[in-house]
Image (cartoon, rainbow, N blue to C red):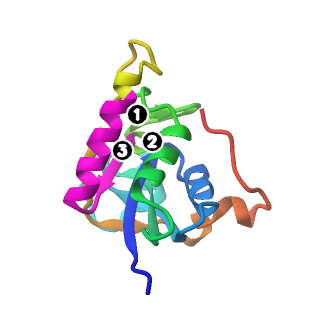
Amino acid sequence: MSREEKATFAAGCFWGVEAAYREVKGVISTRVGYTGGRTDHPTYEEVCSGKTGHAEAVEVTFDPSTVSYQELLDLFWSIHDPTQLNRQGPDYGTNYRSAIFYHSREQNILAEESKKGLTESGRYGRRPVVTEIVPAGPFFPAEEYHQQFYEKQGRRSCRIG
């Protein structure tokens, strides 16, 4: 019997992030939404205004017997530039920040170790990794038209960066 766990990541526009995680064996489901802010049930327009404090994020439900949280972290680091503060590519604002919202003490430890390892690797030279690592809070699903956006558009992914 498999058990399910949740992982939540923010790495810029949630459409591309969701598309990347949907291709991972062991990911049971994904949903895009808003987390890390100050208001309940924000809309896309409210989040984009920067006034709610939410990040565009992806909540990943996964089977840890098939894919590890570490593997999900490795993908997270590979699909965006964690040195860009409050932006990814052409998208900017706090809603596009790089963040890991952990759901357990173990996830917190793994995320911190992973970030430290990335920093020490020298991959980004002197540019600091600015990714926040914070406890998961309420997650508010985005509007239906945002869910699996690229699949609805007949695309599999986007270029992030």
Tally of marks: 3
Q: Position of residue 141 (x, y in %)?
A: 44, 69
Q: Which residues are magenta?
A: 98-118
Residue picked out by circle 2? 96
Q: Residue at x 41, y 44 (%)?
A: 95
Q: Is residue 101 magenta?
A: yes
Q: Is residue 87 magenta?
A: no
Crowding near the residue tagged with mark 2, few <14, some 14–19, many ≥20 C-alpha atoms within 10 Å = many
Amino acid at dot 3: Ala
The single residue placed furthest to the right in the displayed view is 154
Q: Is residue 151 left or right of residue 3?
A: right
The single residue placed furthest to the bottom in the displayed view is 1
Dominant secondary structure of the residues highlighted in magenta in the image: helix
Amino acid at dot 1: Asn
Tell me, yes or no, whether the two marked residues, 3 and 1, touch with CB atoms within 8 Å. no
Q: Position of residue 153 (x, y in %)?
A: 76, 61
Say above or below: 43 vs 86: below
Q: Position of residue 160 (x, y in %)?
A: 61, 38
- Give the alpha-carbon distance from disc 2 to disc 3, as whole Å: 9 Å
- Give the alpha-carbon distance from disc 2 to disc 1, as whole Å: 5 Å
Residue picked out by circle 3? 99
| Picture quarter with the N terminus | bottom left
Say above or below: 15 vs 63: above
Tell me, yes or no, whether the two marked residues, 2 and 1, touch with CB atoms within 8 Å. yes
Q: Is residue 134 visible?
A: no
Residue picked out by circle 1? 86
What element does badge 3 sit on?
strand
